[in-house]
Amino acid sequence: MIGILSDSHDNLVALRKAVSLFRDAGCELLVHAGDFIAPFAARELEKAGCPVKAVFGNCDGEKKGLVSALKGFGKVREAPWVFEHRGTRIFLAHLDGAVANAVAKRAYDIVIYGHTHKPEVRVSGPALVVNPGETGGWLSGKGTVALFDPATGRAEIIGIG
């Protein structure tokens, strides 16, 4: 299982709920699609007990601090980040403008993005497109994350409060 989150925007209460959910689901990888905001928030993800891969969002100004905060259990870098996890080809970005081009390449099993704060799971060509919504819940009042099962190729949006 892969835990997917985005736009946590320093909401520690929401991050702790997400981490608990991911830990209980037995996630072997967490993917953050940007906008942690501060390094102290990124450190919360270590408690999930699995590696983290993340990209910077448009609100992530403390890039060196975020790199340092994730050191030892994860990595964060500029988007897009294309990688493979147990045979699943993953495209990870923050901005929604990258989605159409990624889908058009027909090279990825899952395209993950954030930024819009709107949860979405849809199939586009051969790719599953996932936006976990806003983990922080600041805009909608409802924090959300996603769980992706590489074995089935399915994802679901889960509310965290």
Image (cartoon, helix red, strand yellow):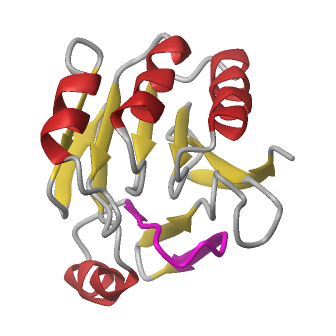
The relative height of residue 3 versus residue 138 in the rendered view (above or below) is: above
Q: Is residue 125 visible?
A: yes
| Residue displayed at 49% across by 71% down | 129
Image quadrant occupied by the N terminus: top right
Image point (65%, 75%), residue name: 118
Relative to the observer, which residue lies in front, 85 or 113?
113
Q: Position of residue 88 (x, y in %)?
A: 33, 45
Residue drawn at the location 29% of the way across and 64% of the way down: 108
Left or right: 75 as drawn, with respect to 48: left
**Quadrant of residue 121 in the image?**
bottom right
The answer to which quarter of the image holds residue 64 is top left
Seen in the image, is 112 located left or right of residue 25?
left
Residue 115: percent from left, percent from top: 46, 73
Quadrant in which residue 59 is drawn: bottom left
Q: Nearer the viewer, residue 110 or 12?
A: 12
The answer to whether residue 150 is above or below residue 16 is: below
Q: With respect to residue 82, does 100 lie above or below?
A: below
> Which x, y percent locates residue 133?
63, 64
Q: Is residue 122 highlighted in magenta? A: yes
First to last magenta residue range: 110-123
In magenta stretch: residue 155: no
Q: How many marks?
A: 0
Q: Residue at x 55, y 76 (%)?
A: 123
**Residue 28 in sight:** no
Q: Position of residue 70 (x, y in %)?
A: 27, 25
Query: Which one is nearer the viewer's eye here, 43 or 4?
Result: 43
